Image (cartoon, rainbow, N blue to C red):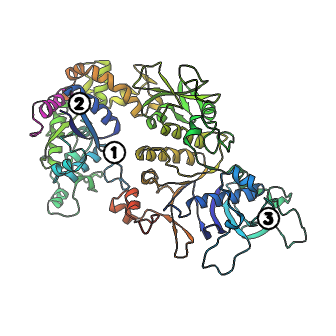
Amino acid sequence: MKINRMSFGNFKSLCDVSFEPGNVNVFIGANGSGKSTILEAVGLLSAAMTDRVDANSLQRKGIRLSPSALYKSRFKNLTRMKPTIDLSVEWDDPGSKDKFRYDVHLTTPTDTDYWKYHSEAFFRNGQKSWGRSNASQDLRNSYIGFFLLDEEPSLVDGRIIAHSFSNYAIFQPNTLTLRGTAPDPTQMSPIGLHGGRLAEALQEIIKVEDGDPKIGSLYLEDVLELIDWASDIAVDVPKKNSLNSNIPTTRQIIEFSDRFMKNAVKFTGYDASEGALYVLFILCLAMHPQSPSIFSIDSFDHALNPRLAKKLTQMFCGEIINRDKNVFLTTHNPLVLDGLDLQNDGIRLFAVDRDKYGHVQINRIQITKELIQEGQSLSRLWINGRIGGVPELI
Amino acid sequence: MKRNIGIVCEGPTDYILLKGIIDTITQTEKFYLQLQPEDDLSGAYGNGWKGVWKWCVDHSGHLTTYMNAVAPALDLIVIQLDGDVSRKEKEVHCQCGAVTCIHKADTDIGQDLLSPLNCPFLKTHDCPIILPCPLHDEQAAGFIDHLTDSIKLWLNNCSPVCIAIPCDSTDTWVAAAYDRSADVETIEDPWNTIISRGKTYHGIRIPGHKKRSAVYQQFVSHVCENWDFVTQLCISAKIFEERMEESILHKSPEKV
């Protein structure tokens, strides 16, 4: 499956914007430029396509709940408010030569928690092959999406993408949850949106293959390149000698051996650096067989030293491309950009800026020969304001 | 007194090993800064011997200024290039007196070929360079002399630098520390022929036969503990030790 284009209209600061994603999509931009809103728009689209749209389904996907009136764009230059929020995705499927598109137009809730489907449509090679709307004679429950429910045979091919979208979520880990001392308010399997159940998820992908310990498809030594103070990583039950009995804990905990300490000394996730936990969280998301095949991570660089962020980005991109997943990331760390191989078309960088009206603009940054000849790193180009995605007045 | 040392080397595993070895040789407190490899969008430097060469050329006119400009200011720069570069790479012989080449003349009159690294004829049959080069002995001492002179040429004799030419590579010093075989310096490509041949090397796992920093973190303490054996077995290690002592121990910080 290859997502060719995503379009969003009238949703928060996304007045009318589209972009062509790859497997790894990194959004950079000033604070408040609309990066997180793009991740939320993908979430709204996934909820509409695969389920229904209400406070519950949005929260499950990590979307911030806003007052109903604030979901629609409220720009000064818009003289007439549009009635619907408009979302669209175009894609191909490797099993078919056809090109598909799904459009949905939603109205925000008024007296209930539920968003209404104003219309929904499925296109094959530009021709509408299925649809429902409030205007049709077939008045069905307008609070439920029918793309996955309708028995129309022509929908079968197009639904493959819906299954990939159904588990979409925006992950935003926090340190206390990663350490296991605070519950994850949005727990899901295999790993919660804030990092809950990390130890269990990690244990599920730790294995020994041909005598070599591995985490997912990576050799343990590859992971230890990222956590260079550690000499081993394991998952075990909490023990008195590794965790203070006054600390709340989970059923399973991550244990690190420190290469500078004696062998018997183990650090749990509670005592270890948050960067190490964050690395494991990112790798679990990329490699766990039950993790979503389309997902977002807001603030990908959270808690990471710049060089570690770069190395982790390289490793993460490799695993995502190998598994043909689609991820959407936001970052403020320039070194993340240096970890992106933009010569690979599956890895794409987008600058998010506001135009003179405040509408979000998404511009793909591509590496030109001239840029390469300049010999500057992407991080430097970004910091110097050469590729957009920076605050104008600071 | 604490010294600040910048390291210019072919790769991250060389950096790990050099830090430990310099500590062992000098026995004084030091701060290290990895100057090269430094990543770049265009691969202007990149890893490997070409990266070291480019770094040297780029910093040749202003090494002292550069050393004072980084924080903390550097007392010394250690530059490493594996001896196998002299054995395998035509480019480093381009400037040897034995080579007569019309394209080399182009370089002299300031045309496009600023460096042999950019010469389009080197990898083709048009290149007159023959390996082994008749001007250099095909053994460690010959490689060390040749590459030491080359680095000095690239740097335009800027100092203070200390040059390390492990022969055949830094992996040779690892193999010498573990296996202590007399002819270790004559073995080509010790990583593939000795260290990563099996799944483990002296109990240390080498998963996927791949060079990793985590593996070298485990090698380095053994190499340092057995450094005396390494210098007995490897002339390249002995020469580096002497150069380090000359650079650090026998000179005051002002003169270094």
Location of residue B172 with respect to A297 vertically, above or below: above
Asked whether residue B173 is drawn in magenta, I would say no
- The residue at which mark 2 appears reads as B29
Q: Which-is-in-front pick, marks 3 and 1? A: 3
- Crowding at dot 1, Cα within 10 Å, few <14 / some 14-19 / many 20+, comes out as some
- The residue at which mark 1 appears reads as B47
Which chain hosts label 2?
Answer: B
Based on the displayed image, in which of its 4 quarters is residue B223 positioned? Answer: top left
The residue that appears at 33% across and 40% down in the rendered structure is B11
- Amino acid marked by disc 1: Asn
- Crowding at dot 3, Cα within 10 Å, few <14 / some 14-19 / many 20+, comes out as many
Q: Secondary structure at mark 2?
A: loop
Q: Which residues are magenta?
A: B237-256
Asked whether residue B241 is drawn in magenta, I would say yes
Q: Secondary structure at mark 1?
A: loop
Which secondary structure dominates the residues rendered in magenta? helix
Quarter of the figure with the C terminus of chain B: top left
Which chain hosts label 1?
Answer: B
Is there a contact, CB below 8 Å, between mark 2 and mark 3? no
Based on the displayed image, in which of its 4 quarters is residue B88 positioned? Answer: top left
Q: CA distance from mark 3 to mark 1?
A: 56 Å
Report the front residue among B186 and A1.
A1
Report the front residue among A183 and A218.
A183
